[in-house]
Amino acid sequence: MSAILRAENLGKNFGGVRAVRQVSFEVAPGEIVGIIGPNGSGKSTLFNLLSRHYPLSQGRVWFEGLELTNVPTHRCSRLGLARTFQIPSPFSRMSVLENLLAVYRPEPLVVMKERAGEILRRLKLDRLAAEPASSCSGGQLKLLEIGRALMTRPKLLLLDECVAGVNLVLRTQIIELLQGLRREGLTILLIEHDMDWVQRLCDRLLVMHHGELIASGSFAEVTQNPTVLEAYLGR
Ligand SMILES: Nc1ncnc2c1ncn2[C@@H]1O[C@H](COP(=O)(O)OP(=O)(O)OP(=O)(O)O)[C@@H](O)[C@H]1O
Ligand SMILES: [Mg+2]
């Protein structure tokens, strides 16, 4: 089947910093693909390019065969591309439920409420529904961030470090959640530093270093790749 996401020669410069350079890859429908790489290697910037939060300095992006290069962020979301951010930024005075309902969708409120209820139960956040988001723990905020993305009924979900700082029990819960979502047809591209977690979840990895894609393949392939070892260990 043809790719759900295709990136061709993506580049992003911040002044003299070449945060992303000449990055090309594809993601097939139903895959769970992990992006790894040292701090500052351009992973989050790549997500910002894919979700159209940043204009591209170079390159093109296609989602389900449709070119996204000049499509605004809100339209990407309506097309079925959702993302989470590395640092969750909920509406802290609004309740957990209201944070889900604040995600814009051209659907009746009753439909949104029903979906929000289902998502909160699935994320095991339902008992916090009426609590202000400011009372959530770091891990609960990560779940809320995933929940907000799921409210858009995405086909492709981009997750930027959704288990950073999250305890082991919740990490396993999130693996089960993401595997369940994949069985329902969702495709997932995620950034993560925890190699054990990545190995348990991802079908395939992409490795970034200094803004470039330096390797791709199975966990075993990339972790034995001398270029990847050098990038991580500086050897
Ligand atoms: N808005 C910005 N303005 C200027 N420079 C930026 C901006 N965003 C990122 N950068 C720079 O681009 C490079 C890549 O940053 P990015 O956040 O994409 O890395 P990352 O791989 O996500 O790192 P981490 O694992 O620490 O989250 C870094 O050198 C960073 O300082
Ligand atoms: Mg990042």
Image (cartoon, rainbow, N blue to C red):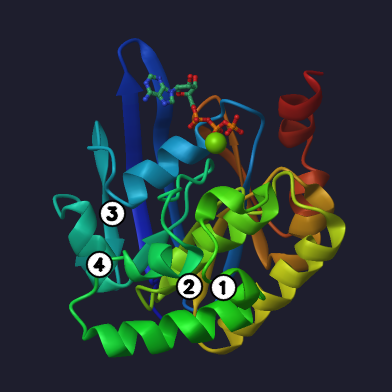
User: Which mark lies nearer to you, 4 or 1?
Assistant: 4
Label at residue 31: 1
Which residue type does callout 1 highlight?
Glu
Instruction: Note whether residue 123 is visible.
Output: no
Q: Nearer the viewer, residue 22 or 126?
A: 126
Disc 4 marks a residue whose amino acid type is Tyr
Label 4, label 1: how far apart the Cα atoms are: 27 Å
Quarter holding the N terminus is bottom left
Asked whether the viewer can see residue 1, the reply is yes
- How far across and down, in percent of the image, does residue 127 sit? 64, 75
Quarter where residue 66 is shown: bottom left
Relative to 50, does residue 231 appear above or below in the rendering? Answer: above
Amino acid at pointer 2: Ala
Q: Amino acid at mark 3?
A: Val
Q: Which of the two discs, 4 and 3, sits closer to the camera?
A: 4
User: Marks 4 and 2: which is nearer the front?
Assistant: 4
Q: Which residue is mark 3?
A: 61
